[in-house]
Amino acid sequence: MTASSASPPSCWAISDGAAGNERQALALARALGLEPRVLRISVREPWNLLAPRLRAGARGAIRDQHGAVPAPPWPDIAIGCGRRAALLTRGLRGWSGGRTFTVQVLDPRIDSRAFDVVVVPQHDRVAGANVLHSIGALNPVDSGWLGDGRTRCCELGALPAPRTAVLVGGSNRAQRLDAAYFDALLERLAARHATDGGSFLVSLSRRTPAAIAARLRAAFAAFPGTFWGGPEDGENPYAGILAWADRLVVTPDSVNMVSEACATGKPVYTFAPRVIAGKLALFHAELIASGHLRRLGDTVPAAQVEPLAETAAIADLVRGRWQAFAAGRPA
């Protein structure tokens, strides 16, 4: 990170263990050329409820995945993602005597000046001199990541084309994904297969309910392709699915999944028969306006767009601010 450093900067990637949060913190760390220590923290009450606002006694309220309280040596740079992680990221600034450069991903729900840098999607509408904006979620998807996925899952290349990736999440406050939703989605995908042929590369998330997963597994068994619903199906072929897909259909609930699909540079579609609520609607509108996302059923051919490659650009901006910070850091 810095020309004067004798050894690589130390880094902590901090989250509450939620897959989407950890993935963003790790993606940014690795885009910075760092191999971070991964911390999956838990926070006891009342600090958990009030995170990251309640600072007094916060250090003793935090435990990592091994049950340990955060302790020195403090990292050169800390990257937290999510509200609970923000409690630790914020604390490191003071505990380290100002030596740790703190980066918070996603809206910390407090003044951004509590951190050195805050990285948020535009739809969160957070402003500040130290705030960097993305459209979607930070992620590891780039040409190298996709190339590795193609190599590791080369058997997917033998499936009939066009290969349609189907990425499935679960209900949230912004969009309900119930049995009726998936019946309608399956009807549209079956109609597309009747016209185009090909195969389906299906990947479910941890948030997909077991009953829905079983329903989808039975339905997609009628088509050529592959189906991954969890560890019972072996190693997760997610990177290979994105790499070998000719087009992607993503449920509308997950900013992370939609962002990663759009980072491939391939045609990406979503199916949202119900009105999308809240900030998620703004996210979808931005991607549709930029041409990165289309509604399933659109009849106009998808235009070729550049991949939504935001992580590397954000990393460059963070690197510049880190270098300026390091130059004036206390000895």
Image (cartoon, rainbow, N blue to C red):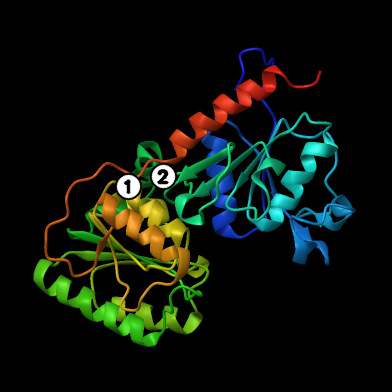
Say what amino acid the circle numbered 2 marks. Answer: Val
- Callouts 1 and 2 close, C-beta under 8 Å: yes
Which quadrant of the rendered structure holds the C terminus? top right
Name the one closer to the observer, 163 or 327: 327
Q: Give the secondary structure at mark 2.
A: loop
Q: Is residue 4 above or below residue 229?
A: above
Q: Is residue 19 above or below residue 103?
A: below
What is the CA distance from the residue labelled 1 to the residue labelled 2?
A: 7 Å
In the shown orientation, is residue 169 left or right of residue 126?
left
Q: Give the secondary structure at mark 1.
A: loop
Task: Name the residue at the bottom extreme.
Answer: 180
**Residue 139: percent from the left, percent from the top?**
47, 47
Would residue 319 be seen by someone viewing this image from the given angle? yes
Q: Is residue 205 above or below residue 63?
A: below
**Residue plotted at (74% across, 59% down):** 51
Residue tagged 1: 264
Name the one closer to the observer, 131 or 294: 131
**Residue 115: percent from the left, percent from the top?**
68, 41
**Residue plotted at (18% across, 60% down):** 160
Say what amino acid the circle numbered 1 marks. Answer: Thr
**Residue plotted at (65% across, 45% down):** 112
In the shown orientation, is residue 155 left or right of residue 98?
left
In the shown orientation, is residue 217 left or right of residue 267?
right
Residue tagged 2: 141
Q: Quadrant of residue 12?
A: top right
Which quadrant of the rendered structure holds the N terminus? top right
**Residue 267: percent from the left, percent from the top?**
23, 54
